[in-house]
Image: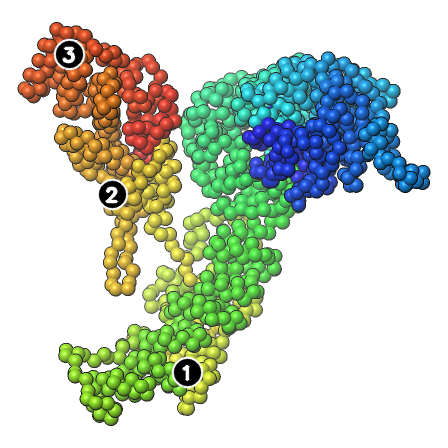
Amino acid sequence: MLTKFETKSNRVKGLAFHPTRPWILSSLHSGSIQLWDYRMGTLIDRFEEHDGPVRGVDFHVSQPLFVSGGDDYKIKVWNYKLRRCLFTLLGHLDYIRTVYFHKEHPWIVSASDDQTVRIWNWQNRSCLAVLTGHNHYVMCASFHPRDDLVVSTSLDQTLRVWDISALSQKSLRAPSGDEVMGQMRGNLNAAVNADLFGSTDAVVKYVLEGHSRGVNWAHFHPTLPLIISGADDRLIKLWRMSDAKAWEVDTFRGHLNNVSCVMFHPRQELVLSDSEDKTIRVWDLNRRTCIYSFRRENDRFWIMAAHPHVNLIAAGHDSGMVVFKLERERPAYAMTSGNLMYVKDRYLRSLDFDNGRDVSLLALAGSASGGSSGGGLGSFGGLGGYSAFGDMANGLGGSSSGSGGGVQRGPARSMSYNAHENALLLNFDDENGRYELYVLPKGAAGEASVEPRRGSGTYAVFVGRNRFASLEAGKTIVVRDLHNEVTKRVPVLLPGADMMFQAGPGFVLLRNEERVALQDLQQRKIIAEVSASLIKYVAWSEDSKRVALLGKHVIVIASRKLEVLATIHETIRVKSAAWDDSGVLLYTTLNHLKYCLPNGDNGIVSTIQQPIYITRVRGPAICYLDREGNPGLMPIDPTEYTFKLLLLRKRYDDVRRMISENRLSGQAIIAYLHKKGFPEVALHFVRDEKTRFALAIDSGSLEVGLESAQALNDPDAWKQLAEEALRQGNVEIVELCYQKTKNLERLAFLYVVTGNFEKLMKMSKIAEASGNYMAQFQILSYLGDFESMSSVLAECGQVPLAKLCASTHGLDEIAAQLPGEGSSPPLKDASLLCPPVALDNGANWPMLQISRGLFKRDTAAGDFEEPSADYYEDAATFAESERDPTWDEAPGAAKPNAEVVDPFAAELDQRQPSAGADGGWGDDDDFDIDVPGGDDAGAAIDGAGEAAGGEDEFGRAEDDDASADTGLYYVPPKAGTGLEARWRRSSKLAGELVASGAFDDAFKLLSRQIGASDFAPMKEAMVSVYLGCRLSLPATVNVAPIASLVSQIGDVDRPLTCFSLAALKERMGVMSQSVTQGRFADAAKVIRLIFASTPLMVVDSMEDVNEVRAILSTCKEYGIGLTLEALQKQAKAEGNAARQVLLAALFTHCRMSPQHVQLSLRAAMMVAYEVKNYIMASGFARRLLETSPKPEFAQRARKVLQFCDKNMTNAHEVDYDDRRDFVVDCATYTPLYAGQPRVECGYCASMYNSEAKGTTCSICQICSVGQNAEGLRISASQVR
């Protein structure tokens, strides 16, 4: 079974598929109804109004309705769009088992434990008929899909088929006069009559008896006059009907408990059943045998439902539900240069793409038992078939098995075609895998039959002109010739490989759960690897330079050497992919056709109604196969991804042509161009002034921004334009913006900086006329006009300040004329403020010379160049084509103010700004004053412009070309790659990645190399590494500090890391000294710091790497020893003498320095002596004497040995035998003797028992125990 979706919930009692949308309803024993999207795997809604279990649920075929029935005796009709219950139908007197809509009439049929079946009209909310006759609970009732029949089952051991044709006819005609008069005369309501006497509109046609216990379910065949039923007698019975009678045809036996539900497969000649024996069984309707069964370990099955149009089945069990299908629907196909080879209806067919001719080449061989039954069983391949049910068994923890008669031949999973030898390989999903080799005769067509050569093995693919390879047991690649004879056996070099794909002559792609590897069969080595989880299919480009690795929800695009170019993640399953001629990947999901560019940009081409499998992309169309194996051609619109591809490949001539032809539109293109750094291109799509202004600011196009700002006339727009113009040094536009916003303070400062004191004096007159004393005083201070400053202070009533200002600046006469007594004493050591010196001459900043803008050709270059077949230009060729020829000329040839020609300007008729209209100072009317003798604002600007011209300070002529062509604008150069980005790109070690700020990449690398799972202990070390390569130099007041990045000496593309081997040795010395002095807590802190910092080190040579490994091994021993010491103290405090002496004994086996070993032996000897374990104390004393200890240690050991030899007893039994080889189990801190199963930490190599696998190591506190790890990588020589 192929599991598509699974939920975990309370017991599921009812299921229903939506007829068109990917939805499924599940009603739970808890009383809730859940609406799921099985494609996305998400819960859409929950409906909870029933009181008690809900046992039946069904969707309406066309209306946004569903019906439910529960143990509260209520039938509820819901509108899922309104998300509420519309109304409730009351009438049943006991639990309601099932409810179903009629496909044509507005009817609902319900079955209840009140022994009745009721038919309701949901439009007028009335009961049409009550079907009575059963004398026990009615377990199920449903309409016939075409005829006016209802089948019901009951615990009275019978099935009843009801004829409702009279009810159907009655609903199609108007009521007669007698019926109307009878109702008017007070006759009883029809529903009341039906309750009392039964309905005359529905009569029993057949009563089927044969089950020995209660019948739980019955189902009509969709096309044949057959009924299938399941009962508590564990049997499934097949019944046949005619016009006159119905009879039992056969019985299906195999279930071991009550059969809960049984149904016909809607598309194949199969019967599906589930039971309380925890199994789902699939039966061959023709042979009446069980061909497959699936079992859950803990859950009984209760209900099944089949999708009316899609090959999906759902089953509800005790802990949720599962949606699955019985077979793979992907047709097997292979591509040649001009043909599509595919399998349909057990025939090999060939489709010629050039003329569209589709011919049958040969009939494929039948099953091994002489042909299969007519139902087409799908992927049941064999007695123990893996494919059809293996996925579900593996995914859900269940077990699957085959049974019944004959080996069933399922459809091929994949195909490989050899055009040179006209040979074909078909792969089948049997238990151990199977392939069939067909060598097609020349001119094969029609009913030609070729006996295949069969063999065992999975994923057979051609690897040469007359060689093919197959994967056997995931361990060996077997190479065979076209006679199916083995020529070579190559070991699989990727551990855990379970799938193999074609990769060209002499190569294969192997995948395991996490990686894909390219293996060379001749050299028997891995050429390249890439991280990609559970890849299912691959799609090679025609030139085999690129490959798309397709997983369930991911696509990895890689080069021939498996260098990752892009990764795409999808929320819906990916189905197929194919490359077009230009290198764009088109792929399909369940409901979309999408594209992906080589840089990872992707989008939707179109929506598809049903899943399709792309076989070829040619121009504006794709060729595909549907799930029935029918080929088709779908036209597509490639404009969007062609435009993006041309932009990516910098073919700007074609981009300009597409824009001029108005072939692109929409906000998506504008957003894409903005995101990718092409706002100047997006500018030509926009007509909205706000958007146009924002893009102009982002692209640095001041002229377009000025034009839009004038149209908007918004203060915020003028403010943004001023900031951008100031950034580019365009003084004229900055001045204009400050004038528009009347920002006098900034404008005055601008004039001061640029030395435009003439306009500054004019500003003071304007401020004086407007009565703005503060602005006037500030401007006068800029000008150094102290006399006027004193006058301003006097006019505004600040006479003392005016007097002080005049006297301070030596204007004694003016000070004397001012009223007031006395004068302020002169200031000591005071100096006058001089007017500021201009920093600029007022001209616009010179721009960086760019001889060509974003678009390479001028509008006068002639016709556009047609795009080439391959848009992927060589990087070196492209770089040379972009090189400016003037770069190699003499420096004097450069023009500092050279501007860029806008290639769009000539064609798109852009409006150009007029600097003279509102430039310079602007009109005095802006300030609503009349300044006598004031110059015209426009003339002031023009004058400034003329002043800016002429000669520069070196006597060279200034360039005025910037104002000569109104269609010019500046294109700022693109920012280069930053140092941090270069670090990330070149870093291959964890420490370098942390230093560059790529923490996520460092986490993944450490997890793969040492099995790291808990990075919290490494936080402090990582922060130190990150900050250690960054300097911050203090600057002057109000200036941000200068940040600097420190690279390695001799390699600027690699960061400098702060942890060195010398520092590590120094910490080891500190740790050893702490242990000697008995400061075990301090020593443990140092050990933890060493473990946290060592993976982030970077050393030069393998000798250094080996030295670091030795230090880590020593740290592990000390870490274990210190942990044992801490636990020993704890055991002593708890009074656990046996545990105390065991921990002391284990401490003596840690491989520490001789001095510390002596100290541990002395401590263990004393502990054993104190707890009266004299035998152990004697052993420790002997071992201590063998180490040549200090005299005082030796004397004490001899005394203990002398006493213990006289008393050879142990007061406490301890699991410790020093005569056997053992290591310390760091999970339980007990001996782990040789031969016992063990796992180790991939980083510090601490040993653990097998039960500790997956836990965090207690010694290094970083890595997971038992996780496969590549090993510590701290030197560049290890990753080359």
Answer few, some or many: residues within 10 Å of disc 3's Cα (few below 14, many 20 plus, some between 14 and 19).
Answer: many
Q: Nearer the viewer, residue 195 or 35?
A: 195
Quadrant housing the C terminus? top left
Is residue 220 among what the camera can see? no
Residue type beneath disc 2: Cys
Where in the figure is residue 1217, as x and y percent of width and height? 24, 12
The residue that disc 1 covers is 940
Q: Is residue 133 above or below residue 104?
A: above
Q: Earlier in the sequence, mark 3 or mark 2?
A: 2
Q: What's the amino acid at mark 1?
A: Ala
Disc 3 target residue: 1178
Furthest toward the left, the residue is 1191
Q: Nearer the viewer, residue 550 or 1087?
A: 1087
Residue 1193: quadrant of the picture: top left
Quadrant hosting residue 23: top right
| Residue position marked by numbered label 2 in the rendering | 1058
Along the horizontal axis of the image, is 926 left or right of 1149?
right
Secondary-structure class at tag 1: helix
Q: Earlier in the sequence, mark 2 or mark 1?
A: 1
Q: Residues within 10 Å of mark 1 (few under 14, many from 20)?
A: some
| Direction from residue 1174 to residue 194 in the image, left or right | right
